[in-house]
Image: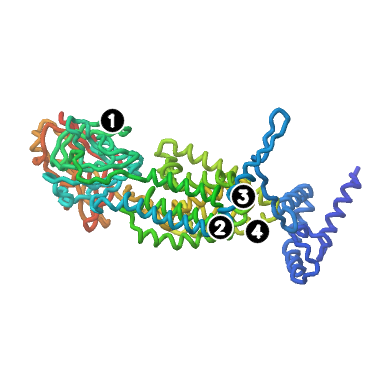
Amino acid sequence: MQATPSTTTLQRSHESLEHCPNQPKVHPFQGFEEDVSDSLQAERHSRRLCEWASTFWCTLESNYPRVTRRMRQFLLYMKGPRPVIDLLEPSPWIAALTIRGRTYGLPLEHRLVHLTRPLHERPWVLLFLAIIYITGLSFFVRAQSFLTPAGSWVGCTSAYWGANDGCGLDGAACEPFTDSSFDFRCPAQCSSVKLQNPRAIGDGQVDFVPLIVGGGDANFTYRGDSFLCAAAIQAGLVSNLRGGCATANLIGNFTDFLPRSAHGLMSIGFPSVFPLSFRLSATSPFSHCTDLRSEALVLNVLVTVALFMIIRPRPILTFWCMVCIGFWHITLFSQPRTQPPDIADGFGTFLPALFVCYAFWRLAIRFVLPTFSKMPIEATILYLGPFWVTVLANLTTERIPIDRLTAKDITEQRGGLLSLIVIVLVLLVIIINQIRVIRKTGWLPYYLGCYTLGGLVTLVFALLPTLNLRLHHYIVAMVLMPGTAFPTRLSAIYQGFLLGLFLNGTAAFGFAPMFQTTAQLQRDGTLGTDLPSFVTNSTNYNSSVPFLNQTIFWSPLPKGGDWDGFALLVDDVERYVGTALNYSLTALQSGLPHFFRIAFTSAGVAGDFTKAATLWANGTWVDPSGPS
């Protein structure tokens, strides 16, 4: 017996056919059109949409009616109201307090606004205080950076000796090795400045710590490639919080650098000889050695709090004061690019940063900051808290163990992968919530279109050969700031956070390129070049031959390559450059361990060095493995 279609099935088929004539009466995209029936342009646009979409949509609707209905409902929901609307301005949180069912009035915001109205209504007050602030700040900067000779300033990573072959053959580029002293001044917060790539020391490697070798003997002797300021902090001569001055005295050759742990820093040992070493003393002739960045921070925080709570200028003036104070605090105090700060270089970045900040104001901040003008206490907390957190990113967000967002960095740094997962989850929650807020206003389709277009353009550039996408501080702020243009408390928090992040990125590092080559990201890391190999190994080394008669050998150059020679490091010092395939140990000191690393060279430039082949004092040879 043949089955008869049910009435419901016939009805659905009839409804599906009604949706698919040449000019459908009810098109599925009709709900996305503005109510502009009197506009001929909108009608033509709708007709064109019908022509390309009707066939696909009707086929989908006839086969999957429930799915298309859900899709229509979801898309209409995401579209939001039409016409677009504005969100209600937030009301004060601390206007009332409820205890045991009874409500007590707390008109703190209202009373503060009333008390500060005389200052708010007199613009000359802000001008007068600005003149006093700028004048006082100039003396502050002078005392901070310009009363010490410019040549005595050293950075947190300054050292006498360069990595690998950085000092040339026998260290000639880093002479003198002895009978020399240097009076220097260190900035504050150097103990947190770390190596970003592995550094070979003897048969080991150090990474993501300040480089300090030695200091454990009675005279506190350090190897020449130790970070000068980190060694001074460990020796107790310089404060990590306040900086300070000291004197380095070069003593030349030293054997057996001992490790040490003091003042929160750990040094490593080196059991062999090194041609340059130094000892530190507190006999510096300088009188202005104290870093004043903490005092400057207190001053600038108090000034910004006074702007929000007491002076209360127009919102646009408050915004520009935040921009200027934050930028110059970073440039002059918390993260100057050079010591002493290069003010001309600072202005070179400041002017283009102002243009970007004006875009921030036009696109987002002008829609949020004015809504808190009658809530100065809340505005102070919501804006200035996250603002100063990211202005001081070198003390806050940069402590997160993620630097270059490369797979190597994330996997090698302790906690890197976990930190990345937490950051992604937090960002996902924030973005979803902000999408919910934007949808309420009806602006979501426009924002999705702009962000999608920008993402596609970025993806095209990111896929270009030899280029890597680098999300610098300021780029993250520029991308996310437009999505905060809605008057909510969370938007105020995001704006303060992103504005500080932008200022930190530009003031401390400039407008670094968004796309960088692999070599730029590697910095002083390995390049991935070919590695030579030692012919001498643990099986053929004859320990019965006297040490001074020993010779080590390595393999010849590969055929058809660009390499034209070799560079050999002995005990982390370049001792040979040339085309020979062996090196005599006659010049080395017996009774000590020695470490050998070799690299190919091309036109005098060395590639990656191997890890150390180690010849211990008892005649045991340990083979190397991989690049150093």
In the rendered image, which quarter contains the C terminus?
Answer: top left
- Label at residue 122: 2
> Which amino acid, mark 4?
Tyr
Query: Closer to the camera, 30 or 13?
Result: 30
State if disc 1 and disc 4 touch (CB < 8 Å): no
Seen as rendered, the residue at the extreme bottom is: 40
Residue 323 left/right relative to 438: left
How crowded pointer 2 is (Cα within 10 Å; few <14, some 14-19, many 20+) is rated as few
From mark 4 to mark 1, how far is it between C-alphas?
58 Å
- Pinpoint residue 595: horizontal percent, then vertical percent: 20, 38
Query: Closer to the camera, 564 or 500?
Result: 500
User: How many discs mark residues in the rendered view?
Assistant: 4
How crowded pointer 1 is (Cα within 10 Å; few <14, some 14-19, many 20+) is rated as few
Q: Residue at x 13, y 48 (%)?
A: 176
**Colour basis:** rainbow
Label 1 vs label 3, nearer the camera: 3
Q: Secondary structure at mark 4?
A: helix
Residue that numbered label 3 is attached to:
372
Residue that numbered label 4 is attached to:
446
* Quarter of image, res 415: top left
Residue that numbered label 1 is attached to:
261
Label 2 vs label 1, nearer the camera: 2
- Disc 1 or 3, which lies upstream in sequence? 1
